[in-house]
Image (cartoon, grey):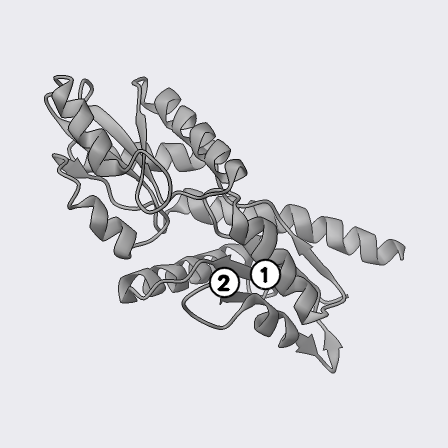
């Protein structure tokens, strides 16, 4: 059986820097996995190709190449629970495994702590954990888990704020922390790539804004590990059938 391909599924953004970051992440994961593993990117919104289009294009000698779909999402909401399975079904691909989303995970919390310190955060400064937000309760639960992981990593409390969907919004949390007497307030970005949401964080009134999680060796290892576990399961299942 062919080595399963990896289809890295991201949200999509109109930001050129964000698109470049997803491409760089896919390239880094491909280098981690080696030349035998084909790595493709797909998007569920804003951009193409869609996951279904990518899956339909995976073939070798007229046969479908098995595929592992890895959702590059920091919380499992509508896109992970609805869009990705629908796209897989629409592709009619006969051999696909979908992994859990990449977040929350302790590795991401460690990266966020590094990004915060690089932005100037020091112990004693207040922290706003900034997530995109979702109307899906499961995604909000994931955000709370991710915030707890960052709290553990920093050894300091963080307050959750949302950029687009949900309350409280990031600027409100920043203002509340200042009103409560916080001397300096920093925003920890629970976003994967540059884009409109990251830009909004810089207008929220904080003293510093951490960079998004982005391409980091720990992210690359996390995605590669998601792929390897699913690929082993896929190979065993097809070998047994």
Q: Label 2: state its secondary structure.
A: loop
Question: Image quadrant for the C terminus?
Answer: bottom right
Q: Nearer the viewer, mark 1 or mark 2?
A: 2
Q: Which residue bears the numbered disc 1? A: 6
Q: Which mark is residue 94?
A: none
Marks 1 and 2, how far apart at CA: 16 Å
**Going 60% across and 54% down the picture, which residue do you hit?**
82
Q: Quadrant of residue 129?
A: top left
Considering only vertical position in the picture, is 42 above or below 151? Answer: below
Which quarter of the picture shows residue 17? bottom left
Residue 168 visible within the image? yes
> Is disc 2 surrounded by few (<14), some (14 to 19) or many (20+) residues within 10 Å?
many
The residue identified by callout 2 is: 44
Figure check: 127 above or below 140: above
x and y percentages locating residue 188 in the rendered image: 28, 36
Disc nearer the start of the sequence (1/2): 1
Residue appearing at x 53%, y 43% in the figure: 76
Q: Quadrant of the N terminus?
A: bottom right
Q: Nearer the viewer, residue 209 or 160?
A: 160
Residue 61 placement (x, y as % from top left)? 73, 82
Q: Quadrant of residue 22?
A: bottom left
């Amino acid at each position: 059986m062919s080595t399963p391909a990896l289809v890295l599924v991201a949200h999509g953004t109109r930001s050129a820097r964000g698109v470049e970051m997803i491409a760089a992440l896919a390239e880094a994961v491909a280098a981690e996995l080696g030349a035998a593993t084909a790595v493709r990117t797909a998007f569920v919104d804003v951009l193409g190709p869609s996951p279904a289009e990518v899956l339909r294009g995976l073939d070798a000698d007229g046969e479908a190449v098995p595929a592992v779909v890895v959702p590059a999402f920091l919380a499992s909401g509508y896109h992970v629970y609805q869009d990705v399975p629908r796209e897989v079904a629409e592709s009619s691909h006969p051999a696909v495994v979908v992994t859990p989303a990449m977040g929350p995970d302790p590795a991401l919390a460690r990266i966020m702590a590094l990004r915060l310190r690089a932005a100037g955060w020091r112990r004693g400064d207040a922290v706003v954990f900034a997530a995109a937000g979702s109307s899906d309760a499961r995604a909000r639960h994931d955000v709370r888990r991710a915030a707890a992981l960052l709290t553990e990593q920093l050894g300091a409390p963080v307050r959750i704020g949302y950029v687009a969907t949900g309350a409280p919004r990031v600027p409100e949390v920043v203002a509340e922390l200042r009103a409560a007497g916080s001397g300096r307030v920093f925003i920890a970005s629970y976003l994967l790539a540059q884009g409109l949401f990251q830009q909004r964080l810089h207008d929220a009134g904080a003293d510093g804004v951490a960079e998004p999680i982005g391409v980091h060796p720990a992210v690359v290892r996390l995605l590669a590990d998601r792929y390897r576990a699913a690929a082993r399961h896929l190979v065993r299942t097809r070998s047994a059938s």
